[in-house]
Amino acid sequence: MYAVFELAGMQFSASEGDVLKVPLQEVEQGNRISITDVLLVKTNGETKVGKPYLDNAVVEAEVLGHGQGDKVQVYKYKRRTKYRRRQGHRQDYSEIKIDKIVPPKS
């Protein structure tokens, strides 16, 4: 089973048992989340596509932990003006494990 879902304005594709890094979710570690913004579900060769979302389709996941991604360097430079700025950024994320994909009922 395979699903494409939307979480925090970003789209993710996953199968059951996959571990994903998604934008930070305000949920404690070990708790479960239900994602109802499911765009596509593929089961046994049958594909169902929503307009834009599928009704009654749910992706259930468990929050494994939280963390920060790798540092990204942001460098600004303007020539001939001695203008240089350097800044680092680390994006927060939550790590989730897809437990179950519930397809919509036909």
Image (tube, grey):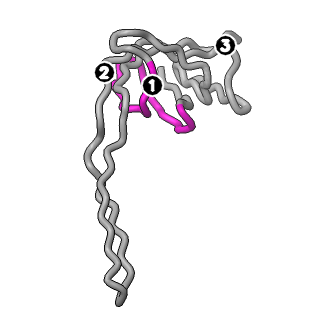
Residue at point 37%, 33% (across, down): 93
Mark 2 touching mark 1, by CB under 8 A?
A: no
Task: Report which residue position mark 1 lands on.
Answer: 25
| Residue under pointer 3 | 56
Residue furthest front as drawn: 82
Q: Distance between the residues labelled 2 and 3?
A: 27 Å
Q: What residue is shown with label 2?
A: 65
Q: Is residue 40 above or below residue 83?
A: above
In the image, residue 75 sits, relative to residue 97, either above or below, namely below
- Amino acid carrying mark 3 in the image: Asn
- Name, please, the residue furthest toward the right: 51
Residue 51 shown left or right of residue 99 in the figure: right
The x, y position of residue 60, in whole percent, is 48, 13
Where disc 1 sits, the SS reads loop
Task: Please report the residue visible at 41 percent of the width from the left and 13 percent of the height from the top.
Answer: 99
Looking at the rendering, the stretch of residues picked out in magenta corresponds to 8-26
